[in-house]
Amino acid sequence: MTITVTTWSLEQTSPADLRPAAQAPDGVRIVRAEVPSPEFSRYLYASVGADIAWTDRLPWTAERWRETVSRPGTETWVAYEQGTPAGYVELEAQDDATVEIVYFGLLPDFRGRRIGGHLLSYGTARAWDLADRHPDLPPTKRVWLHTCSKDGPHAMDNYLRRGFRLFDTKTEDEPEPTGL
């Protein structure tokens, strides 16, 4: 069995494009995971993506995780609510002064609590100032991401409200996920 999946690519081309969400709810803070940890990154990926069919990284070895999270210009920012991980955003510097928001999402129990807009705003701002923390990188000229029809029902609205603009749409058939 297959399902039809639509993938949308969105971008910002100036820091002025960012339209931040309202202030974070009480008890929410966002912290950079400065020590690369393949185990923690895998936990975040698997926990956020478990019910929305994130599967591409699940077979990765610990070494592959370590290589990915240790690359220069790759950062993981984690939202915590009262000390508990609530979600994360993973940034990756790319060629041509571009930063991709590779992964962004909330653990299921933290969705619908006004954390996502704040986390996306904060993560996007950190994509724009990535070169401030990595002097070997050029200043960011473009921030982009993709989302798909398998993601949560509020994902696209959140991206558009934060000032991202659609630049590409693709539709393809994929094997239907099993075991979710």
Image (spheres, grey):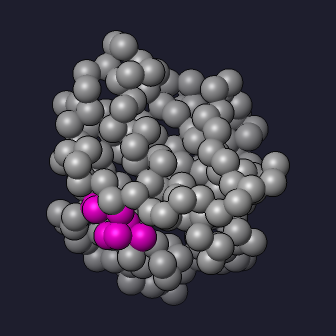
Q: Is residue 58 left or right of residue 141?
A: right
Q: Quadrant of residue 176?
A: bottom right
Q: How many marks?
A: 0
The image shows residue 54 at horizontal and vertical percentages of 58, 63
Report if residue 161 lies within the magenta region.
Answer: yes
The image shows residue 91 at horizontal and vertical percentages of 45, 40
Please report the residue visible at 49 percent of the width from the left and 82 percent of the height from the top: 153
Region in magenta: 158-164
Q: Quadrant of the C terminus?
A: bottom right
Q: Is residue 22 left or right of residue 114?
A: left
* Front-lying residue, 56 or 151: 151
The image shows residue 7 at horizontal and vertical percentages of 33, 70
Residue 31 in view (yes/no): yes
- Which residue is situated farthest in the top direction here? 136
The image shows residue 65 at horizontal and vertical percentages of 62, 35
Please report the residue visible at 36 percent of the width from the left and 13 percent of the height from the top: 135
- Which residue is situated farthest in the right direction here? 83
* Front-lying residue, 153 or 119: 119
Q: Is residue 76 above or below residue 139?
A: below
